[in-house]
Amino acid sequence: MSHDTGADVDQLLALSRPALDELFRMSPAGEIPVGDARGTVLVARGAAVSRVVARLARLVAWKGKVFDAETGELRNRVTPFGVRAIRAKVYRDASWFDDGESTVLDYSRTSILAHWIRDEIREIKPGIHLGIVYWGRRKVLNFALSSLGSPTPDPASARRASQQIAVTVRAAVPTERVAEVQEVLAEASRKGAAGEFIPFAELAGVHFARLVLVPEEPDHAGETMPASIVYMSEADAPMDAHLADLVRKAGSGLERVFGHCRGYPPAGAPDATRVAWLRAHSVPSSAFYVNTVGRSLRRIQQEDRLREAIQEFLDRHGAEQATADPAELRAAIQRYVTARPDLAWARSAPAPPDQRWRIREAAHFVGVPLAAIALLPVIVIALPVWAVVLRWHEWRDAPSRERPSPDQVARLAACEDFVTQNPFTAVGLVKAGRFRRATLTGVLFAVDYGVRHFFNRGSLAGVKTIHFARWLFIDDKRRVVFASNYDGSLESYMDDFIDKVAWGLNAVFSNGHGYPRTRWLLRAGAEDELAFKHYLRCHQLPTQVWYSAYDALSTHNLDTNARIRAGLFGELGPAETRAWLALF
């Protein structure tokens, strides 16, 4: 039976020899590897030194082992060319380390060169084994084996996973099928049923996800814009991997929703065909806000587990910590975490985003201002003209007097306030004319630049309760969708925006039909609190199917957990140590 301690090869490189011994002791023999297994030498000399030694050993001496299940033997892959040599017998036997069962790799019967060597391995995670090397009866070295295709973390993959993406798939629903889709969503919205409908928790790297039905609506010319079903998720990159995972694990749920849309691949179609259909119906975001860039789902879950482990340790030693010196208490916590193999990752800093992503972001950060400077003569001439035309449009705008009905508010409220967070989804008609469409396009371009480069560390212009938010155009830019995941109630969410960033609300939403009247794009508008709240409620859509991977954690909790990790082994002075302990 497979065993999972939570440790992986990258974390093993940071462990001390006693910690490796304890991890080996607590692990079962597990499955015997089959086929290729990538080898990593573990010298237990600190993460930095261990990584260098492991890299050099793999480069010039030993790359791993190849297991043959039929013969019960293995061969090592040695030299820089990975030559298969140095044969060993593979069998189960009692370990020399603790007499428990282990898989033995015995060279005494098969190799003259390695006659005095014996290896023992135990499975610490599906596809990952921790090994001990003996020379005679003396334990001399540890190593790790990662079976081909096992979930061994690739540093490049970890860096890609530290980038969050907004996935939106939208498909029109024929008028005669809308009622069926509504029925499916209503069924899935029953408490506890959403995860059965689409097993969101099984999808790798998904932070939040939702399904909403956008109703049909006439545009300013009277032409009907069709109803559509929209799938949205905030996930760790890359998009193709997410769509493939979605199709593989949620095919039946997707069929029940998108199967009502024209062209969706029929039952029995290859997964690749369905992935291609989803990608063809994907909609890019015009602006995408991430509370903290680089905070992957795996990191969030690990840091929350770290906080819980330290809190349990402190609870067990409550009387001692009351009188302990802060520095001594922190040192005791460090010793406790170091002795836990499953928390080995806490000794390392989070993986930075992929270098190519950082280069692209840096190019975007510099390129946009440079382009603006190059266009400055045009901007200087165009800006006064735009301002005059804007003011003329604002004089002519007619604010909506519509109020949400009690039934509408009740339908919306039925989808809210079940956990720490809430979803918000709204759709609005862009005001008539090319001017407003162009203005909104420019504003969202500016918003995207701001949230990509300035408001990406826990605050959206002072609003700190939003996990993710996105703005996107649909129906040839005749409508715009806004979707977010936020902490607390909708009332507090709207108050937070009105109090701290009303000018930002005006800049974006004043280009929507019926918005409260503004002045010079940024003034008034949302300052009429009641009118603004009515406007939002009237354009809000019921988010019947919604998922959160960490529904008990607010943005404040996530920030606290990150600070705990950063301060655990970082250099802290006396005052900083007391502040760090106060986080618990």
Image (spheres, grey):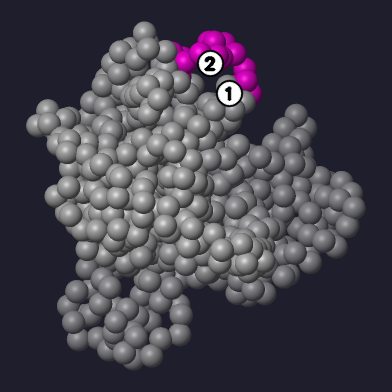
Nearer-the-camera pick, 13 or 548? 548
Q: Residues within 10 Å of mark 1 (few under 14, many from 20)?
A: some
Question: Residue 265 colored magenta?
Answer: yes
Q: Residue 277: which disc?
A: 1
Point 75% across, 29% down: residue: 70
Kind of residue at badge 1: Trp
Which quadrant does the C terminus fall into? bottom left
Describe the element under mark 1 as helix, strand or loop.
helix
Kind of residue at badge 2: Tyr
The residue sitting at the left extreme is 406
Where, by quadrant of the figure, is residue 314 drawn? bottom left
Of the two numbered discs 1 and 2 on the same chain, state the one appearing first in sequence. Answer: 2
Percent from the top left, x then y, of residue 581? 29, 78
Nearer-the-camera pick, 290 or 137? 290
> Is residue 93 found left or right of 259 in the rendered image?
right
Point 69% across, 36% down: residue: 34
* Image: 407 above or below 151: above
Measured in 3D between alpha carbons, the distance from the residue under mark 1 to the one under mark 2, in whole angstroms, is 7 Å
Magenta segment boundaries in residue numbering: 257-273
Q: Residues within 10 Å of mark 2 (few under 14, many from 20)?
A: some
Q: Residue 139: which disc?
A: none
The residue sitting at the bottom extreme is 574
- Is residue 128 among the parts visible in the rendering? yes
* Image: 333 above or below 475: below
Percent from the top left, x then y, of residue 143? 67, 59
Q: Which residue is mark 2?
A: 264
Tags 1 and 2 touching, CB below 8 Å: yes
Nearer-the-camera pick, 146 or 362? 362
Point 66% across, 40% down: residue: 149
* Image: 385 above or below 51: above
Percent from the top left, x then y, of residue 311? 27, 66
